[in-house]
Image: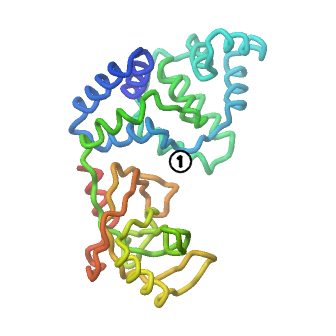
Amino acid sequence: MKPFAELIDALRLCRFEKDKKRLWEQFIQNNQDHESYVGLVTALLKNECPKGIISSKNLKLLAMETAGIPNWLLDESKNFVGDLSETIALILAPLQSEKKVDVGLNDMLLTMDDLRFRDSHEIREWILSQWQHLSTLEILVFNKLVTCSFRSPLSLEIFSETKNSIEPIQLKLVLLYAERGRIKGRTGFTEFTMGIASGESYVTFTKVSVQLSDIESEILEKWIIENTQEKFGPVHRIPAKQVFTVECSVITPSKRHKSGYRITEATLISWENGMSTEQVTTTESLRAILKG
């Protein structure tokens, strides 16, 4: 969490875009052996953030209660500072423990995923424990993450200048559901739900937009219609037989997803027509990728 907070602060203090670009390229260079971490940071900076676990209003109330200050004083402080998350971080500074705990960014996001389904008391207790052991700078970023108010200090142009520095991950996934919609001026299948192998069955893993040639789309559409097992409105459930190559930038564990994983920037690369489903990515192979 500390390196991420320091990166955000450094980017925020840069006056010119060229300086932000230089700082971002340096970050990529320093973490070239940690592609998963770079991918996670990239996703956050592109506003692909997890859902918040507490509202800004309730975070403000918790901060007032913790610091023992009235509403008018916090509001006056916010008017001076200009940002609620930073104001809370500053008023909590005197209450912080001298013993700082280095919490990993990914671990923090995983805990948020888990707490989203817990009661408000557990969420409040966890936030209080983080406030006590994080630095003022870390609390500022933490507050934005838990309230889903984190915004990117980088332009999209910078990410396109650095996109190739993150090695993409290719996976073999199986088609489980196909959803109809408008494509190229006609009705067709526009979104696929893909799965990975888990034991003797398959679990849903990610959704991708359909990007196939006209010929492939026609052949596959006919196959889907002929093999549909069940329909839920525009969604067709089909047997797990068609394999595709899907590319993504990062994979992270997630208790909120059936597969146990969440991926960022999933893109359909190709239809592996005729490939055996024995080649489909498994939960075990994903663990190996994460360890790598």
Identify the residue position indicated by label 1 in the image: 113
Q: How many tags in the picture?
A: 1
Where residue 101 appears, x then y in whole percent?
43, 26
Residue 159: x %, y % from top left: 35, 37
Say whether residue 56 is left or right of residue 156: right
The residue that appears at 46% across and 53% down in the rendered structure is: 254
What colouring method underlies this structural image? rainbow
At 49% from the left edge and 54% from the top edge, which residue is drawn?
255
Whether residue 33 is situated above or below residue 288 in the rendered picture: above
Left or right: where 52 falls relative to 73 = left
Quarter of the figure that contains the N terminus: top left
Question: Residue, x 57% and y 28% (percent of image)?
Answer: 143
Q: Amino acid at mark 1?
A: Asp
Query: Which is nearer the eye, 116 or 55?
Result: 55
Q: Is residue 245 left or right of residue 193?
A: left
Crowding at mark 1 (Cα within 10 Å: few <14, some 14-19, many 20+): many
Residue 31 position in % (x across, y down): 25, 33
115 is higher (above) or lower (below) than 256: above
Q: Residue at x 43, y 15 (%)?
A: 13
Q: Is residue 143 left or right of residue 262?
A: right
